[in-house]
Amino acid sequence: MPYSRNHMQERTYLDWNATTPLRREAREAMAAAWDLFGNPSSVHAEGRRARGLIEDARIIVAEAVGGEPRNVIFTSGGTEANTLALTPVIRKQKHDIDNIIVSSIEHASVLAGARFPPDRMTRLPVDRSGLIDLDALRAMLARQPPTLVSIMLANNETGAIQPVAEAAGLVHEAGGLLHVDAVQAFGKIHIDINELNADFVSLSAHKVGGPKGAGALVLAENRSHPTALIRGGGQERGGRAGTENVPGIAGFGAAVRAAEADRAIDTARIKSLRDRLEDGLRQTRGGVIFSQKVARLPNTTLFGVPTLKAETAVVRFDLEGVAVSSGSACSSGKVQASHVLAAMGYGPEMTRSAIRFSLGWETTDADVDRAIKTWRKLSGALLRGNETGLEPF
């Protein structure tokens, strides 16, 4: 049976960082696009109508991040956008990029190094709060220019917002380029590619109420351009070959417009719900809310208790009708130790204990109440024998 709004009312969905429900506006835009059968590269009327939907969406996405429409390359999602950006061959550069530096808390698609060989990649450490070490970045840049650096704007597990603009200053001073994976932050906080001083920014539709299978790489004005990952046609101004996903792109644009229109109101309400959720979780002896003392996404809580097995906790929550996560949802359904918490200096007892609660625009007070009530019901059995106390960071 399809996962419907009624089904969501029967359950409590608190895994919005993994994916979001399709917004009504996106569904309607996609339905209209399905009736347009013209190829957007064709010059006849049918093709022009399809092209018009793509270009309208391009304008919306560009404006949402302070970019120019001509600098938006539509992709199949955030992973492809990241892979497109992370290449040693960048147009408008005097020389190919020799090395890549990625923060140790990045998404798997960035940690894989994309089109760089493994021996050319260096991982940037983070501190106990989950923020990148700017001094370490400065030292790395001094040793191995020219360099491409990739730093996510907000971590998908802890929600910690990174000092991207400060990092950009160091990177550009050293003659390098900066890619920012803004997939998790998009639609939740203000994003401006110029204020971040980033060269490339990756986005994904399904994190803001759009369809899965659509995303974008936004390029800074008058900066460098990565060589195409998919070749064989002139689509996306030469940035990505292949006939565009017209319904997906149309849905992407509609979702972004709706998300940006409501973002300020949603942010305040969601943050209030998150704070109330965390007040309930803090009552657990030894409980840690990770990255609690730094700026975070307003919807994200990563919570752990020593001896808690995240895999068991996620299943037990699910059986009680509450959908939560153990962290990133990009591991083919596997519950694994958190590489983010390991990078922050936590040992196995904590990296395997973390549960992520992430809220969204349809989350209600009743959802938060149910999550707290469920945790109180389950925690006794899940934490039996836990006598460890830790202070939050």
Image: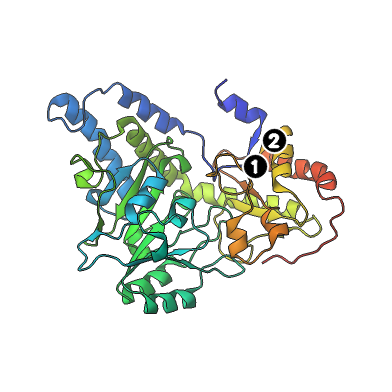
For label 1, the crowd category at 10 Å Cα-Cα, with few meaning under 14, some 14 to 19 and many 20 or more, is many
Give x and y (percent) for residue 375: 76, 44
Residue in front for this viewpoint, 273 or 291:
291
Q: Say above or below: 55 vs 141.
A: above
**Quadrant (top left/top right/bottom left/bottom right) for the C terminus:** bottom right
Disc ID at residue 324: 1
For label 2, the crowd category at 10 Å Cα-Cα, with few meaning under 14, some 14 to 19 and many 20 or more, is some
Disc ID at residue 249: none
Q: Earlier in the sequence, mark 1 or mark 2?
A: 2
Residue in front for this viewpoint, 333 or 295:
333
Residue in front for this viewpoint, 346 or 134:
346
Reading the image, the residue beneath label 2 is: 318
Q: Is residue 12 visible?
A: yes
- At 48% from the left edge and 64% from the top edge, which residue is drawn? 103
Give x and y (percent) for residue 293: 63, 66
Q: Say above or below: 91 vs 329.
A: below
Q: Are marks 1 and 2 in contact (CB under 8 Å)?
A: yes
56 relative position to 342: left or right: left
- At 21% from the left edge and 28% from the top edge, which residue is drawn? 39
Mark 1 → mark 2, Cα distance in angstroms: 7 Å
Q: Residue flagged by tag 1: what amino acid is it? A: Val
Q: Say above or below: 35 vs 306.
A: above
50 relative position to 209: left or right: left
- At 42% from the left edge and 75% from the top edge, which residue is drawn? 140
Give x and y (percent) for residue 179: 37, 60
For numbered disc 1, what is the local secondary structure? Answer: loop
Q: Residue flagged by tag 2: what amino acid is it? A: Asp
Give x and y (percent) for residue 233: 19, 39
